[in-house]
Structure formats: C-alpha cells, structure tokens
Image (cartoon, rainbow, N blue to C red):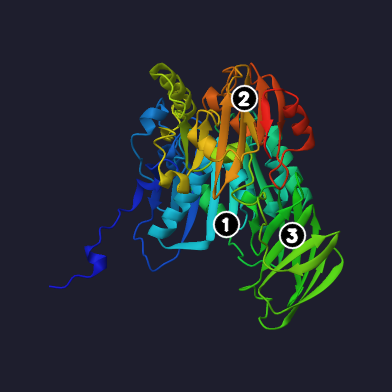
C-alpha cells in the first residue's frame, strides 16, 4: 500500500499550543505560543500576527491576551498560564515569542523574535505581505522598536500602553510605509499616557497613517480593552505591505539596521542619524534627498517602475547621474559630491554591519565567557576567576515572582577549553589581560589597549572586532563593580549598565567613577580625547 507524505506526516492540531525553535545564542530550545486556525490549508497563504508579551508575563499569556482572554475573576497569572480557554476561530496564524521572559526586546530577545518569525515561515504557509506586529507594555515598546528598526517586514503595527527603549522616538519616520495604531488608558500609573500622546501627535505631524484609542479611567491593563472581542484582527485585516513602494523614507544610526525595502545604508556619517527620502518620480527615474549619509545602495529588481536594460536616472541632493540599466547601484559621496561606485566594500577594519559596536552588541548574539589560566594560577585563583566569569554569565538570576528569570544560558570556559568552533561561531567575552588570558595574548597586537596586570584599582571594558566576530575584553575590576541594585531589574545588576555603554569604559575603584568612555572612530581607533585620558592614566598601554 502506498501512502502520501502528507498523510504520513504528523499534523499539528488547530488552536493554541506551544512550539519551540533552536536558539544558536545558547544552544537551547526556546518556546513560543502558536495559534493555528481551524482547517489549516497549506496551499493557502495565511496572515501572521506576532504578539509580544509584557513584563512579568510569558508567551502563553500573550496568546490569550491578543485573543481578548484575560484571567478569570481572582485568577493569578501563574494559574492562567496553565491552560488555554476556548475562543472563536480567526483565519490568522498567531505567534507569541517567550523572548527569554522579562528582558525587553533588544539583544538576545530581539534575535528570538526574528527566529520565531523565521521558524513559523518555515513550518507554515505565510503571506509575507500580511505580517503584523503587536504587543503590550514592555511588548508595546518592543513593537515600536522592532517595527521601526526593520520597517520593510511589517504590514501594520499596534502598540498597547507602550514603553519603548531609548532611541526609538527618533526612528518615527520609518513608519511612513505602514499604519500604526495605539491604545492606552488615561489613568495608567505605570506607563504615563503622555508618552503615547506625544507619539501620536508626532506621527500625525509627519504624515504617518496613525490611529489612537484612549480608554477613560483605565489603568495599566488597557490591553483588556484593546484586545477585547479579538478587535486587533479586524484592524489588521485590510493592511497589506507593499514590498516595492515608490517612496522610501528611512533613518538609522546603526549598520545593524541598515536596510528598508530597496534602500541599504553603506556608510553613515560618524555618530549621526542618517536619513534618506527616495522615490520613483516616473519609470526608471529616482530622486533622493539625504542627510548624514555618505554611501548607499539601491536594489531595483522587482520594482514595477524599473525596466531592466534601460538607463536609470538618479537625482541625489540635486546632483543628476545616469546609470545604464543596472538593478543594483551603489553611490558614494566624496568631498560632498555623489558618484556611482562599485558595490560598497569596507576596506581594512571599519565599522560595518556586524562589527560596529557598542559593547552590548557583543552580548546580543551567540557568545561565551572566557577566564584566563595561562599564567598557571593557584587553584583558589582559578576558582576566583571562574566565579567572576560565572557571575557575568548568570543572566538567569532569580528576580522575584513577577519578573522570574531571564532564560538565557551561555557557557563559561577557561582559555584552555575554548574550541575552534567557538572562535569561528561566537563572540568572546574575555576576562583578564594578555599576561593571564591566552586569547587576549593571541590577539594582543591587534587589540587597541591593555591594562597593566599589576593594577588593582581600575577596570577596563571594550569591544573590538576580530575576524568575523567580536571580543569584549574586561581587564582589572569587572564592569559591574560598585553598581547598585536599584531600579526596575529587567536584568541582573551585573548586566544593568551593559546596554548603555559605548565602545569603551575605563573607571577607577567603581563603575560609577568613569574616567573615560566613548566610541572608537569609524576605523576602530581611539579618539584623541580617549588617547589622552588613557595614556595619562599610567596603567594603560595603547597599541593601536
């Protein structure tokens, strides 16, 4: 008897459930909630909603919330997490990443969201022009961050009582290619409604399609009203992404987020927010206005107003250029004059995508923590060094019932245990210096600065690209020395300041007493100011 593959293959049930994806960040299976509509048909393209949970919540509760299913009367979140209630079917697939728990939506959790998106697209038939993003509170802030840093993915975004991370507001104009909806309670004591009102007003002023629902006498739980009766699916339904829009407005100051639709940033003016507004004014004719942008590339293949083989005219900041029919064209500005160049390639060590810093970027993807043993330390000293590295790797410190743990489990190794696969595939967080850590010694001539081994009063932490990955070198006192455990503990005190660091910090006795902090230049060199401070300290050797 012959059976079809489809009949033999195990099918997932319809309705709410939990799946996992394999995370390369720490070699773990990470969960996400999934809703599969009844009578799922793989031959049909389905819209997808990505739902981001708030602080103290999880993927299972988030799946309930987006369908308007709040806790039963008197029920705790822990109790509500244990089951999925019955709800009406919608013709959408819904995914809700766990994203490590309560850790915001930058770094590893941000990577998780995109891993979930890719996992769902591999498993199911998704209409890539109908992918939507929503979230509440911390997840509402994540919705704005992810939506605005990679605006060519989403057909629409909806943020509920959002608490966006620093730097999100300056990206507002990236929403010009999709509609945005906000919800907020006017009596919210946790995330003040004034922040959302400011967002709505600004987006309206710059021409974004924005709508807003403010709930009277509602506190922080505005998601109960926002997602009531599965309203969000009704709002998302008509929105369709245009993959090749005539007009692209895009701003970014990070190469990590260097692409929107048919525009890619290749060189951003150092330390500035680069901007472009580019549009097809007619077939094979593009006009662009830029600011703080020194090089960029356009990829025109697939655009309905591009005709392959015919000349394409470009007008950039008033300069007129003609290109003979190429679908991929790169431009560079030298001495304030734009010209067509070969596809952009960084020469030498340069700040580029994947090698731009700051320090937190080394912690935002796969990495291992490495302590030094090359100076043959005593057993007690090895234990002390390993303890520092383990403290740095302990993202899963318990933070109480509400916040729980960050479910991230990186490895801790001695410099003798690091394998070639680690060097090839991971960022290295190196503790010690060239005299006691073999990996610091291996790259000593390439690294820009070294702290003297004999110094016991200072701490130095910096990030630097080596090959395809980063090393972050922590010499002397660890970077969390003297940091107080105050404020809302999204992450353990060890990591509380990491996301705010630049490319280098140098301090004395306590990380609260910073002597120097700053960014390396575009070619990964110390600025004159940092050189002066570090060379004058008497404990730093500058090698580059």
Identity of the residue drawn at 75% across and 51% down? 274
CA gap, disc 2 and disc 3: 40 Å
Within 10 Å of disc 3 (Cα), the crowding (few <14, some 14-19, many 20+) is many
**Displayed quadrant of residue 521:** top right
Tell which circle, 2 or 3, labels the residue nearer the N-terminal end: 3
In terms of depth relative to the viewer, which is nearer, 297 or 489? Answer: 297
**Res 139 seen here:** no
Structural crowding at the residue carrying mark 2, measured as other residues with C-alpha within 10 Å and reported as few (<14), some (14–19) or many (≥20): some
Helix, strand, or loop for circle 2? loop
Residue furthest toward the bottom? 309
Q: Is residue 267 above or below residue 188?
A: below
Q: Which residue is mark 2?
A: 452
Find numbered disc 1 in the image and state the secondary structure of the residue it sits on: loop
Q: Residue 324's quadrant in the figure?
A: bottom right
Q: Compute the Cα span from label 2 to label 1.
A: 48 Å
Q: Position of residue 511 (x, y in %)?
A: 64, 21
Q: Give the camera-side residue of 188 and 339.
A: 339
Q: Is residue 313 left or right of residue 158?
A: right
- Residue 441 makes an appearance in the image: yes
Q: Residue at x 67, y 83 (%)?
A: 309
* Residue identified by numbered label 3: 295
For mark 1, what is the residue?
A: 153
Q: Label 3 vs label 1: CA separation? A: 23 Å
Q: Nearer the viewer, residue 341 or 497?
A: 341
Choose between 80 and 11: the one closer to the eye.
Answer: 11
Q: Disc 2 or 1, which lies upstream in sequence? A: 1
């Amino acid at each position: 008897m012959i059976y079809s593959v489809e009949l033999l293959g195990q099918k997932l049930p319809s309705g709410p459930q939990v799946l996992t994806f394999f995370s390369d960040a720490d070699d773990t299976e990470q969960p996400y909630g999934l809703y599969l509509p009844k009578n799922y048909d793989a031959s049909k393209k389905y819209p997808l909603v990505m739902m981001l949970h708030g602080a103290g919540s999880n993927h299972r509760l988030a799946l309930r919330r987006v369908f308007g299913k709040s806790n039963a009367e008197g029920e705790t979140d822990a109790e509500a997490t244990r089951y999925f209630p019955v709800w009406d079917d919608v013709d959408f697939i819904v995914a809700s990443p766990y994203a490590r728990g309560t850790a915001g939506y930058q770094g590893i959790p941000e990577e998780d969201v995109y891993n979930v998106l890719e996992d769902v697209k591999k498993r199911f038939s998704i209409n890539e022009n109908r992918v939507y993003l929503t979230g509440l509170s911390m997840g509402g802030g994540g919705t704005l961050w992810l939506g605005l840093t990679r605006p060519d993915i989403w057909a629409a975004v909806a943020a509920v009582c959002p608490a966006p991370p620093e730097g999100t507001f300056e990206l507002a104009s990236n929403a010009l290619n999709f509609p945005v909806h906000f919800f907020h309670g006017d009596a919210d004591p946790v995330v003040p409604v004034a922040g959302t009102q400011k967002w709505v007003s600004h987006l309206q002023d710059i021409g974004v399609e924005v709508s807003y629902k403010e709930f009277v006498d509602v506190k922080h739980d505005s998601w109960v009203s926002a997602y009531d009766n599965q309203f969000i699916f009704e709002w998302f339904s008509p929105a369709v992404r245009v993959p090749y829009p005539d007009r692209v407005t895009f701003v970014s100051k990070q190469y990590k987020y260097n692409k929107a639709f048919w525009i890619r940033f290749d060189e951003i003016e150092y330390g500035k927010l680069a901007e472009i507004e580019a549009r097809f004014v007619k077939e094979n004719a593009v006009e662009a206005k830029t600011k703080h942008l020194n090089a960029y590339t356009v990829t025109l293949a697939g655009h309905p107003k591009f005709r392959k083989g015919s000349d394409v005219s470009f007008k950039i900041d008033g300069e007129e250029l003609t290109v003979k029919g190429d679908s991929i064209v790169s431009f560079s500005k030298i001495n304030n004059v734009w010209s067509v160049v070969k596809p952009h390639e960084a020469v030498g060590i340069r700040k580029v995508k994947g090698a731009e810093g700051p320090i937190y970027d080394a912690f935002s993807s796969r990495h291992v923590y490495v302590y030094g043993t090359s100076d043959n330390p005593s057993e007690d000293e090895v234990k002390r060094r390993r303890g520092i590295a383990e403290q740095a790797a302990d993202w899963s410190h318990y933070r109480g019932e509400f916040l729980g743990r960050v479910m991230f489990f990186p490895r801790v190794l001695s410099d003798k245990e690091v394998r070639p696969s680690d060097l090839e595939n991971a960022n290295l967080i190196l503790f010690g210096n060239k005299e006691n850590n073999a990996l610091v010694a291996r790259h000593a001539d390439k690294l820009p600065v070294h702290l003297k081994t004999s110094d016991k009063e200072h701490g130095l932490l910096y990030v630097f690209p080596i090959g395809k990955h980063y090393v972050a070198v922590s010499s002397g006192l660890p970077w969390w020395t003297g940091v107080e455990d105050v404020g809302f503990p999204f992450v353990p005190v060890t990591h509380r300041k990491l996301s705010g660091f630049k490319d280098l910090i140098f301090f004395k006795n306590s990380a609260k007493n910073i002597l120097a902090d700053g960014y390396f230049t575009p070619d990964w060199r110390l600025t004159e100011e940092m050189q002066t401070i570090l060379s004058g300290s008497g404990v730093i050797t500058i090698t580059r």
